[in-house]
Amino acid sequence: MHINPDIFIIARSPFIVVWNYKDHTQFELDSQYSTRLIQLVEDPSSFDSTLEIDSAFLAAGLFSHDERPQAEWGWDVLSKIFHVGTKNLPLEQVPRDIHEWSAQYLDHCEQVLDTQPPADRFAGHYSSDELICLPAPELERTGNALTQVLLDRKTSRSFSPQAITLDDLSVLLYLSLGYLKEREGDTDACVPAALRSRRSSPSGGGLNACEGYVYAARIEGLDPGLYYYHPDRHALRRVHSLSSEPLGQLLAGQHFINELPLGLFLTARFDKLWWKYEHSRAYRMAYVEAGHISQTFQLAATSLGLATWLTGALCDEQVEQLLGLEGTAEQPLFFVGSGYGDGQTQCKELKALIELRERQQ
């Protein structure tokens, strides 16, 4: 018998709380169950299926007959608990189409709005007394082109089936993930040769730990599929065909983006971070880097006249399988997409549902 490697234990008087962070389940154990759990941890071979407690542990998934292989995790267990525990959103049911998503999303928003927002709870922390007024922003100081792109960028949830060009894809990938040829002579000589590649976005330790996988649904001159982007060669390598399921099914049921012609899955090479930073605080840097790259991608897309959308809500295990990353030290963190549309921040199905509910009130 083997103890589940994906559990940890917290003392919360009067119970011992056991949390299965992978399956998002937790159990409160009294002294009798806690004592027996400790005995089984010390000697798993003493497991006895005829005992009520042992049978309950097996049914709850705290023990299993088969040993579960574990991928290498180069940091302490705290970062692993956070990473694994925040994968695969614990939805009762992933929405199967745009109408199910609209209903679930609107129900959630209405429930949240029924509670007092944090801004009202802590209004006293943001006193308006003795304010120091700043000069009016001189936006022309940043250059008109940059200013306009920053002002134009917004999150869109309404896309058309129109394809984008391979030239646009080239620009987007080079500016967001590519190793910039224009900066090859702009590196200090003391930097090791292996760390001299430079992107447009900052990276912790200069490691460029994030990688990009293109979700190509409708790119002119490119067969539909999933492609790995080689930043050093500015080239694509096909890794998988598109899933038979719509894109929204991979992204927690957000089906309003099913028409996206282009998406980019951003992953993190944790082994690169482990190599330089042994402490799990470096895990934060993976998300910081993904955030930098996604913003760069959005600004570049906006400058090309494209709309953008982004999310961290992934059906992780399905995405890992598509990208061929199961059981590896490279993990998907984020998704950013781009295409043509009407620029609306909400999809027409959600708007129609809101109007219907307002009429019914």
Image (cartoon, grey):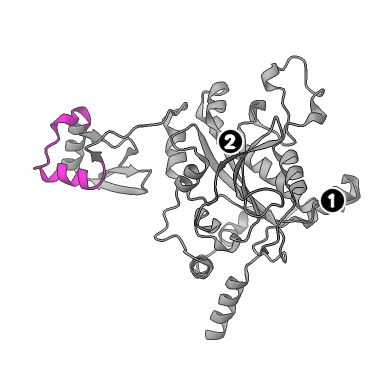
Work out whether 351 lies above or below 339: below
Q: Name the residue rendered at 48%, 46% in the picture.
A: 316
* Residue 219 at x, y percent in the picture: 69, 52
Mark with earlier residue (2, 1): 1
Q: Name the residue rendered at 50%, 46% in the picture.
A: 319
Work out whether 327 lies above or below 254: above
Q: Name the residue rendered at 20%, 34% in the picture.
A: 1
Q: Where does label 2 land, which residue?
A: 286
Whether residue 144 can be seen here:
yes
Work out whether 337 lies above or below 201: below
In the rendered structure, which amino acid carries the disc numbered 2? Ala
* Residue extending furthest toward the left: 50
Q: Residue 225 vs residue 184: left or right?
A: left
Q: Residue 78 vs residue 194: left or right?
A: left
Which circle marks residue 357 in the picture? none
**Depth check, front residue: 238 or 336:** 238
Residue 51 is covered by the magenta coloring? yes
Q: What element carries label 1?
A: helix
Q: Where does label 1 land, which residue?
A: 147
* Residue 194 at x, y percent in the picture: 67, 19
* Residue 44 at x, y percent in the picture: 19, 31
Q: What stretch is highlighted in magenta?
A: 41-62
